[in-house]
Amino acid sequence: MCLGVVGRIDEIHGETATAEILGVRRQISIVLVPEAKINDYVMIHAGFAINIMDARDARETEELISEVLKYSR
């Protein structure tokens, strides 16, 4: 099974970006979504942003992931 997480892009440096993912900042590749810009929400899998999401869908996805994490501990 594959799992993607939602992140918000804070900085862009060429084909890489810094994204906040559930409160943690990580370096990601945006080579698959070159149109991404600062403050966009993106779905991230294996370190790659794979699509841009609207803010409402991103919040819903973050809430679902947080709920799953809460019960998996």
Image (tube, grey):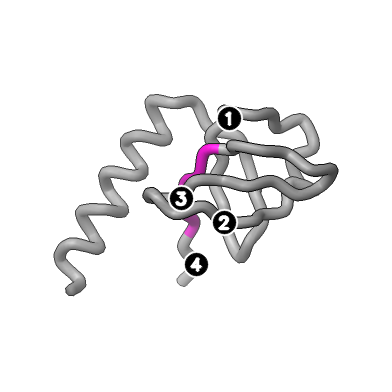
Q: Earlier in the sequence, mark 3 or mark 1?
A: 3
Q: Residue at x 59, y 38 (%)?
A: 9
**Sequence-wise first label, 2 or 4:** 4
Work out which residue is located at the far right of the displayed protein and give it: 14
Q: Which residues, given as a range, are shown in magenta?
A: 4-8
Q: Is residue 37 magenta?
A: no
Distance from the alpha carbon under mark 2 to that under mark 3? 7 Å
Q: Position of residue 2 (x, y in %)?
A: 50, 67
> SS of the residue at dot 2?
strand
Image quadrant where residue 68 sits: bottom left
Q: Indicate whether residue 5 is drawn in magenta.
A: yes
Question: Can you identify the residue that label 3 sits on?
Answer: 21
Percent position of residue 46, x then y = 61, 65
Q: Do the residues bearing badges 2 and 3 touch, measured as CB atoms within 8 Å?
A: yes
Q: Which residue is mark 1?
A: 40
Viewer-nearest of labels 2 and 4?
2
Residue bearing mark 2: 26
Callout 1: SS = loop
